[in-house]
Image: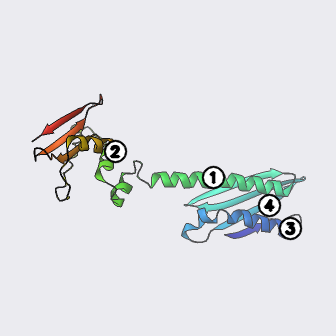
Amino acid sequence: MKLIVSGKTKEFTPELENKLSAKLAKFGKFIEQRGEREAHVMHQMERHLHRVEVVVNFYDRALVGEGNDADLETALTQAIEKLEKQIVKVRERWRDTHRDPNGVRAIKENGAGEAQAASAPAPARPNNGKAAAQPNRPKIFHVNYDEDRKPMTLEEAMLEIERDGDNYVVYRDAARNCLSVLVRRPDGNFDLIES
């Protein structure tokens, strides 16, 4: 980060300038995403009171940190702390407005499964005086018949539901050689649907 200092007094030593550069370098990873930034430091002294103002442009905003103290180093630290709070706040606000609040987009892009994407609430759409919005349609999940799964008994299907933590399992019954669905009820019992 490029540092521009104006209004130096003899108390603003090169050591203080190096400390200030080191503290501002910490913000480099937050600020310098689109090229190198400049930090303008203005130092004034009135009646043994040091007034330090640090200005940084970030996302087309001027962020200003001010510090006042009898000790120059303390005034610099106050200004840097105030600037840090502003940078973090603006960065979080920018991230919140540029990300999908439900995370649905990230799930679909990663291909993590349609079941998780279907469970996320749909964003509200403005009505603008038109007809009522259509209710969310239920999601249809297709059974994959291409898997080479061996036929199961009823007990094996119950064990698979317990092991996977699912509420249902679709399997081919070994005894009857038909397609069966075993569904866990909310009370803990099971329903068996056979074709």
Query: Mark 2 or 4 closer to N-term?
Result: 4
Tell me the amino acid under the disc marked 2: Arg
Mark 4 lies on a secondary structure that is strand
Taking the view exactly as shown, the residue that stands out farthest to the front is 175
| Marking on residue 13 | 3
The residue identified by callout 4 is 43
Quadrant for the N terminus in the image? bottom right
Q: Where is residue 118 in the image (x, y as percent from the top left)?
A: 29, 47
The correct choice, above or below, for 36 with respect to 122 in the image is: below
Mark 1 lies on a secondary structure that is helix
Viewer-side label of 2, 4: 2
Tell me the amino acid under the disc marked 3: Thr
Alpha-carbon span between mark 3 and mark 2: 68 Å
Relative horizontal placement of residue 25, taking residue 172 as reference (left or right): right
Query: Mark 1 or 2 closer to N-term?
Result: 1
Q: Quadrant of residue 112?
A: bottom left
Query: Mark 3 or 4 closer to N-term?
Result: 3
Mark 2 lies on a secondary structure that is helix
The residue identified by callout 1 is 86
The residue identified by callout 2 is 163
Query: Mark 4 or 1 closer to N-term?
Result: 4
The correct choice, above or below, for 32 with respect to 189 in the image is: below
Q: Where is residue 9 in the image (x, y as percent from the top left)?
A: 86, 65
Q: Are marks 2 and 4 in contact (CB under 8 Å)?
A: no
Relative horizontal placement of residue 103, taking residue 194 as reference (left or right): right
Relative depth, front residue between 193 and 14? 193
Badge 1: residue crowd in 10 Å (few <14, some 14–19, many ≥20):
some
Badge 3: residue crowd in 10 Å (few <14, some 14–19, many ≥20):
few
- Say which residue appears at 67% left-offset and 55% top-offset: 83
Mark 3 lies on a secondary structure that is loop
